[in-house]
Amino acid sequence: MGIAVVTGASRGIGAAVARKLAEQGHDVVLNCASRIEKAEEVAAQCREYGVKAVAMAWDVSDHAACDQALKEIKASLGVPTILVNNAGITKDGLIMRMGEAQFDDVIRINLKGTFNMTSLCGAMMMRAKAGAIINMASVVGITGNAGQANYAASKAGVIGLTKSAAKELGARGVRVNAIAPGLVESDMTDVLPEDVKNAMLSQITLKRAGKPEDIANAVGFLASDAAAYITGQVLVVDGGMGV
Ligand code: NAP
């Protein structure tokens, strides 16, 4: 099978994605920002599927660090066949009270980080004439959300980047898609006040929050040959929010 790079794989959705791709038989590189011991734990879980799995910490918003990491991955494992741009942060607040750094940090990690990895890894994949890139967007990148202008803008940007990259890379055998999760149980959503979570839950047709594995299953599909004729799409995985 192939070689998958999953950013933000130390916990939450990224950890579940890494395990799913390992289950499918891919070697996995698990990126994180700083919690390398957590990423090592998830890598050990991946190795139980009989694949190679390595944890590596680097900041996806740092172009030079992404370049260095991908060169190391290519030298040790080979050219990645799957890239999952999952690393992301929130720094919520109303626009009128949002500081410049609060806006910039979220755009830098969520959007520029996705650009850095797509551009550098996409170039390797284009030369190999094969690859699947899956970007983690969000339903709020489609709908907007009060208190999340920075985050929603970053995720709307990820959707535009996904569609543009799909058009640029498609002729060279590289597919690029996005997933737009709704409310998913993770550290990111644990911090939300109960009343906010309950208000969101009341909008969900399936009457439950998503689990990281619900998103990982969608990634597993988009990364597989079952999705060989799918590119430039945004797959909404939100339990029917607002349907
Ligand atoms: P999470 O539990 O907060 O985990 C975030 C992951 O991103 C961690 O592995 C973290 O590494 C990594 N990370 C953060 N900044 C990074 C950086 N600069 N460079 C490299 N890695 C970095 O988040 P999650 O809920 O699983 O969300 C994963 C993705 O899904 C994000 O893009 C998020 O926006 C998106 N999403 C989530 C939800 C949801 O409801 N949870 C909904 C829609 C979309 P460390 O552990 O080292 O800090």
Image (tube, helix red, strand yellow):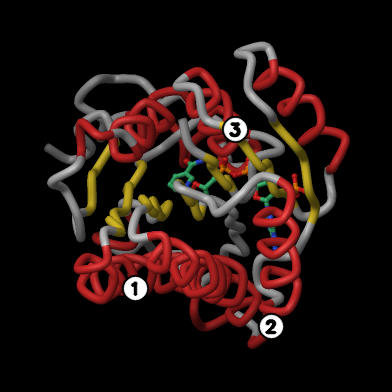
Which numbered disc covers residue 27?
3
Crowding at dot 3, Cα within 10 Å, few <14 / some 14-19 / many 20+, comes out as many
Amino acid type of the residue tagged 2 in the rendering: Ala
Alpha carbons under labels 2 and 3: distance apart: 36 Å
Say what secondary structure mark 3 lies in.
strand
Picture coordinates of residue 143 (x, y %)? 25, 60
Q: Nearer the viewer, residue 25 or 145?
A: 25
Residue at mark 1: C-beta within 8 A of ligand 1: no
Q: Nearer the viewer, residue 25 or 112?
A: 25
| Residue, disc 1 | 161
Picture coordinates of residue 226 (x, y %)? 20, 31
Say what secondary structure mark 2 lies in.
helix
Q: Say which of marks 3 and 1 sits in front.
A: 3
Q: Say which of marks 2 and 3 sits in front.
A: 3
Q: Earlier in the sequence, mark 2 or mark 3?
A: 3
Q: Earlier in the sequence, mark 3 or mark 1?
A: 3
For the residues bearing labels 2 and 1, Cβ distance under 8 angstroms: no
Crowding at dot 2, Cα within 10 Å, few <14 / some 14-19 / many 20+, comes out as few
Picture coordinates of residue 83 (x, y %)? 48, 51
Q: Nearer the viewer, residue 144 or 46?
A: 46
Residue 213 left/right relative to 242: right
For the residues bearing labels 3 and 1, Cβ distance under 8 angstroms: no
